[in-house]
Amino acid sequence: MDTALVIEDVRLTPVLVSDPPLLNTQGVHQPYTPRLIVEVVTRGGATGVGETYGDGAYLEPARSLAEALPGRAVTDLNGLFALADEVCDASHTAAADDRVDAGGLRGVRNAEKIRLSVVSAFEVACLDALGRAQGLPVHALLGGKVRDSVEYSAYLFYRWADHPASGERDGWGAALDPAGVVAQARRFAGTYGFGSFKLKGGVFEPDREIAAIRALAEAFPGRPLRLDPNGAWSVPTSLYVADRLKDVLEYLEDPTSGTGDMAAVAAATDVPLATNMCVTTLAEVPEAIARDAVQIVLSDHHYWGGLHRTRELAAICRTFGVGLSMHSNTHLGISLAAMTHVAATVPGLAYACDSHYPWQTEDVITERHTFTGGRLPVSDAPGLGVELDRDRLAALHRRWLEDDGTHRERDDAAAMRVVDPDWTTPTVPRW
Ligand code: GKR
Ligand code: MG
């Protein structure tokens, strides 16, 4: 083994990132969202970075893995998964088993999925360190890019102008009706050149959201449009919306919850269904494919366990004629770089990936990514091609240290209760 590639040290830095008041079916984003930054340092002096969800359930397994990793090689990614199975005690996360998390809308969050989300940040950090040590971009370590840029879609949200509790305001203003959604889309298209649009739904009654998509179709004729209510609708409501928007939708994303109900919707409409909620683990793939419940799987490299595993998912989807793309959650530039590298290597990526990134005004990298023509260039610099901004990292970590605990867990329902004390996370379809 090349001793220069042996891991000498692992650093974990939880941070709180400012987030606008974006509405979804569970509530509203809090003013700050937790993320975890992982640094892997080799004996040869290369430092690789990774990023993942930062709620408490992720921090304990991350600490166990960080302690166990020194002495292993950054090339031993299969060993990384075996080590995580050994040291990430599921009891840390057992409380999270079989429940939908409070704000991430990441589908069922169980111990395995949390462990994989943790490992993903270590995998990305190892790939970054290896790439830096060898002068190779991460995409080359994944087999090489098949495209020079990756297309992203605008991710539109109903939103308030400012956060009710903190009063924080970002200058985007409110978007609560079709005109507000179209104005937001125009700003996204004008600033970043996005050519396809995803609207986060499940916030208002379906007819209001149908009107917003119709307004988008009028403002951007022929452009791909998606609506994602995060499972907020019953099967009949999903079919009602599909019928009214069938001429303008590229796909409906998670109209309803669970493989059985998604299959029932898929069987009765020609509008393709995409998901980042009902197919989130390998165990969920066979039934979804057998029942033709989804036509596009939206991977999240965090909860699929990193970039190699995302490519494995892509191969499964290809085999069964299911499309693949990527969804996102609140994230920073390290994860966007990782998404872009892996997306660059996946053959036949037929749908623009979505990213929350334009909503994040803060970052931990020195040079933020810039979307041009709705695309990001695939970096050929060694590793991920991003540099940590240590001052920014320290500042966002300080915010995490000083937080009274309110924001260390993402909890969109709690944020909503500031304005509506009776608000509870919906457990059955809202419409
Ligand atoms: O940030 O409100 C949000 C999104 O709803 C996010 O939590 C989802 O995970 O963007 C995601 C999605 O596509 O479902
Ligand atoms: Mg979604």
Image (spheres, rainbow, N blue to C red):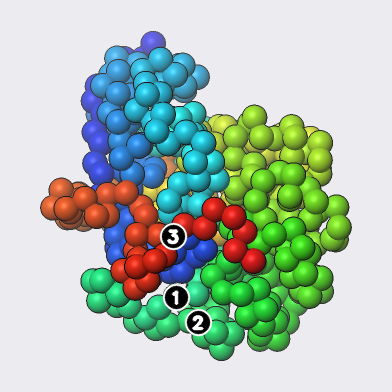
Who's the residue at 29% across and 14% down the image?
71
Whichever of callouts 1 and 3 sits on the residue coming sooner in the sequence is 1
Q: Is residue 150 above or below residue 112?
A: below
Residue 6 image position (x, y, % from top left): 32, 18
At label 3, which amino acid type do we have?
Thr
Q: Residue 359's image quarter?
A: bottom left
Check whether the beta carbons of the residues at disc 2 and disc 3 lie within 8 A of each other.
no
User: Dot 2 surroundings within 10 Å: few (below 14), some, or many (20 or more)?
Assistant: some
Give the SS element for disc 3. loop
Q: Which residue is mark 2?
A: 176
Residue 56 in sight here? yes
Of the image marks 2 and 3, the number of the one nearer the N terminus:
2
Identify the residue shown where x is 30% and y is 65%: 31
* Image spot of residue 13 (x, y percent): 24, 41
Alpha carbon distance from label 2 to label 3: 21 Å
Query: Residue 376's x, y, as percent?
Result: 52, 60
Residue type beneath disc 1 = Arg
Q: Residue furthest front?
A: 422
Q: Which residue is mark 1?
A: 159
Q: Quadrant of the N terminus?
A: top left
For label 2, the SS is loop
Dot 1: element: loop
Residue at the image position 50 percent from the left and 82 percent from the top: 176
**Which circle marks residue 424 in the picture?**
3
Residue nearest the viewer, comparing 178 with 264: 264
